[in-house]
Image: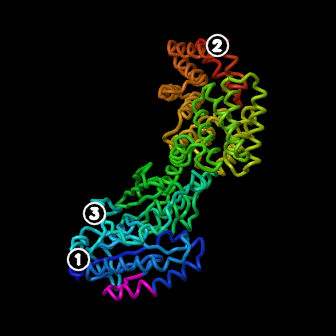
Amino acid sequence: MTDTREQRRLTTILIADVVGYSRLIGADEAGTLAALKDRRKRILEPLVSEHGGRIVKFMGDGALIEFSSAVNAVQCAILLQKRMAEANENVPELRQIVLRIGINLGDVVPEGADIFGDGVNIAARLERLARPGELCISANVYDVVRAKLDLSVEDLGEVELKNIAQLVRAFRIVVDGVRCQFPADTSQPENPLSIAILPFDNMSGVPEQDYIGDGIAENILTDLSRFHDLTVIARNSSFAYKGKATRVQDIRRDLGVNYVLEGSVQKTGDRIRVTAQLIEGATGRHLWVERYDRPADDLFAVMDDVTELVVGALGTTKGGRLRRAASDVKAGAGPTDFQAFDHFVQGMQELNKNTRESIALSLMHLGEAIAINPRYAKAHAKIAWAHLMNRIFGWCTDATVSLEKAREAANAAVEADDTEAWAHWALAGCAMACGQHDRALSDMNRALELNPSDADVLTDMGIFYAFAGKAEEGLIYALKGMRLNPHHPEYYADQLGQIYFDARQYENAIRTFDGIRTLSTPTMLVFLAASHAALGHQELAGAAVAKLLASEPQSSVSYWTSRNFAPFRDDKDREHLAVNLRLAGLPE
């Protein structure tokens, strides 16, 4: 058997890649391919030959080249950038073929005509550090060439390269006359909530396991696409970056997105670890990262589980990392849709506070969003819910008028976008307010068919099942919603506490309510008092009732068990609440 150490050799590796290749192909596929073929034959191949290099292979828009001399490699790269700049002189900026080049001196392992190893990987990562029209070299290369070539060099210091264990000192070389050939990117993608899902890197070292990372990324892409206010780049565009060390800033420019989700999968023994990270496209800043460790006995179940968790973390409205990141966008910063989005975000923030004043502010902001964009389905849907919440908490002057306003907004949401899950969620809320349980559950099921990963809808499905006399089933939905949105607003817990009460799990109800720190709704105090009373905690039940009467003096047993506020299908559930409120000391 041949010792692999004997096959290794020290060589200089040059990797060149076209900047914005996906954008160029999308704009003019035939023209781009023809121009690239011409540049290779007329410029690249002769220069490599002149400098004693060998083209190992072409990789789509990139090239892997090796040289026996580091000096020759750098000289070739500088001339290559200059010749490419000359060829671009009469070409429109957005059609120019511009290269980035990375060069490293290191060990490689030959396999036939190909070469592999960290020496190649480091060159690939260095290429991504280079600016368009420039090259980036490792310290190993710089030490060889610095006394032999007159270079304009920027010392980048020790840098962390993706999937490279050690820090690598890097130097950026500016090529006179061709620096920053590519137009600067100062644009904003059309939708602030836009994202590209990259294939997850296979860290297991077994190519046959690529399907795991690809499957997770594809599932996330598909499920995030169900959130209609998100722009999710299609698979054939985002998966074009598979296996390439691409800067997120370039992906942002190429695909027109604000955010990139990337990740990795590593299967070792009977465990599998999946890492996902959300990155801001303009800066490359990591906004969110999460690791998921699972037994690997059922890979497809792991893929489904991780997909649900990632989609829940990114896509949900409150706590969703995409919306949290995009909420920094201010009105007036761009197109009118940005202004509508800004009002929508502010409206959601106020609505989730669940106070009389915050709901009024929410209606104002959501109304502004609709004024700017009359077909903003999600905003219409949340206007419906704002009116329903005013009715539920007793904060409206006329419950009938509030219900009609909610119906009007819900119908407008469906008319604006019949495939928007929130539109059907709003219709379900109106049906439940009328005691139409079957209609409400049907509308909720339609909402979950359209988007089974929406944690907000799942949470309300839980309370709807509780009102329909199926609180145990409701717990399944509510707990799943909290699992998919671990940074959920506290109203999730408010509703979960009520479902626990309806399921006669009073200790769990009290524990859930006691975990709420900032929210204090009338319904929370109603079900907290009833839960303590059911367990014979008379003093604690009385304290909850006192708080309720202080905030809502009109409170009584008949008030909070009326069909307006407690639309139970089964009178036994309504009487269950009434009996315990009486025990708590609430006036009849």
143 on left or right of 47: left
In the picture, the disc for residue 296 is: none
436 drawn magenta? no
In the picture, the disc for residue 168 is: 3
**Residue 464, placed above or below residue 133:** above
Give the residue drawn at x 74%, y 22%.
397
> Counting residues from the N terminus, which is met first, the one under dot 2 or under dot 3?
3
Q: Amino acid at mark 2?
A: Pro
Disc 1 residue crowd, few under 14, some 14–19, many 20+, Cα 10 Å: few
- Badge 1 is on which residue? 148
Locate residue 224, reporting x and y percent: 57, 54
Locate residue 35, reporting x and y percent: 53, 81
Q: Which colour scheme appears in the figure?
A: rainbow
Magenta stretch: give its range.
42-57
Q: Amino acid at mark 1?
A: Lys
Give the residue drawn at x 46%, y 68%.
242
**Residue 477, placed above or below residue 56:** above
Q: Amino acid at mark 3?
A: Val
The quarter of the rendered structure image containing the N terminus is bottom left
Q: CA distance from mark 2 to mark 3?
A: 68 Å
Locate residue 204, reporting x and y percent: 36, 65
In the picture, the disc for residue 553 is: 2
> Counting residues from the N terminus, which is met first, the one under dot 3 or under dot 1?
1
The quarter of the rendered structure image containing the C terminus is top right
Is residue 302 among the parts visible in the rendering? Answer: yes
> Counting residues from the N terminus, which is met first, the one under dot 1 or under dot 2?
1
Q: Specify the quadrant of the image occupied by residue 56.
A: bottom left
Q: Secondary structure at mark 3?
A: strand
47 drawn magenta? yes
Q: CA distance from mark 1 to mark 2?
A: 87 Å
Disc 3 residue crowd, few under 14, some 14–19, many 20+, Cα 10 Å: some
Q: Specify the quadrant of the image occupied by residue 30.
A: bottom right
